[in-house]
Image (cartoon, rainbow, N blue to C red):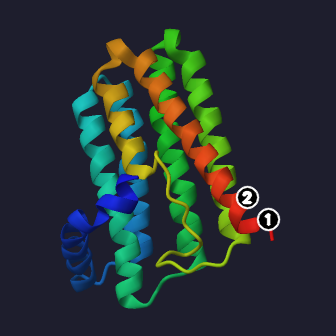
Amino acid sequence: MLDTHGRKYVEPIIESVANGFINRNISANKVTVLAFVLGISSGIWMLMGAPLIATAVLWISGLLDAVDGAIARKTGTSSSWGALMDITFDRIVELSVIISLAVLYPQARLVLIMLTGSIIISMTVFLTVGALSKNTKNKAFYYQAGLAERTEGFIMSSLMMLFSNHIIIITIVYFLAILFTAGQRLKEAYELLKN
């Protein structure tokens, strides 16, 4: 939801950072890899007992995750490989956070497994619709908006890391938001694909 409706407010920051990388001849794919490394370090920082650092690097990773696409569009270097890396790395970053939390908080493992399952379901719908639909947007494939998009994921992951004494309830809320999003996407998919 925030990615779809709030991006216009952060677009100047994304564009400015993208221009900085372009001026230094740093490619979109290199920024994707940098975002990935920072993102997975979030889980490592969490395991090291540094939730504030874990949260900070997660958000920097998220900014770079938006910047890489802006660089690719501005330089005319958008590619299917870049889109594949972006989507795959995003899921690995999410897993890094979830696994670190599962290691640290065994009492939350069941809800963390449920959360992981909901992400798989929602992403399966998202990617299948993207593959089967005509792309009319400024993305590598058809993009389905929903209640829980990438930014909401960062917010919920941050809450899980920073307020771990409430990890079970936060994870359940996150799980329900993703399941709701999967339902939204299935409903939209039915309308798009029924003909």
> Label 2 belongs to which residue?
190
> Which residue occupies the extreme bottom position in the image?
76
The answer to which of 146 and 31 lies nearer the viewer is 146
Q: Is residue 99 left or right of residue 133?
A: left
- Classify the position of the C terminus by image quarter: bottom right
Q: Position of residue 131 (x, y in %)?
A: 70, 69
Q: Is residue 183 left or right of residue 70?
A: right
The amino acid at mark 2 is Tyr
In which quarter of the view is residue 153 placed?
A: top left
- The crowd level at tag 1 (other Cα within 10 Å; few <14, some 14-19, many 20+) is few
Label 1 sits on a secondary structure element that is loop
Give the Cα distance between marks 2 and 1.
5 Å
The answer to which of 175 and 180 lies nearer the viewer is 180
- The crowd level at tag 2 (other Cα within 10 Å; few <14, some 14-19, many 20+) is few
Mark on residue 194?
1
Q: Pointers 2 and 1 in contact (CB under 8 A)?
A: yes
Residue 128 seen from this side: no
Residue 126 seen from this side: yes
The amino acid at mark 1 is Lys
Mark on residue 159?
none
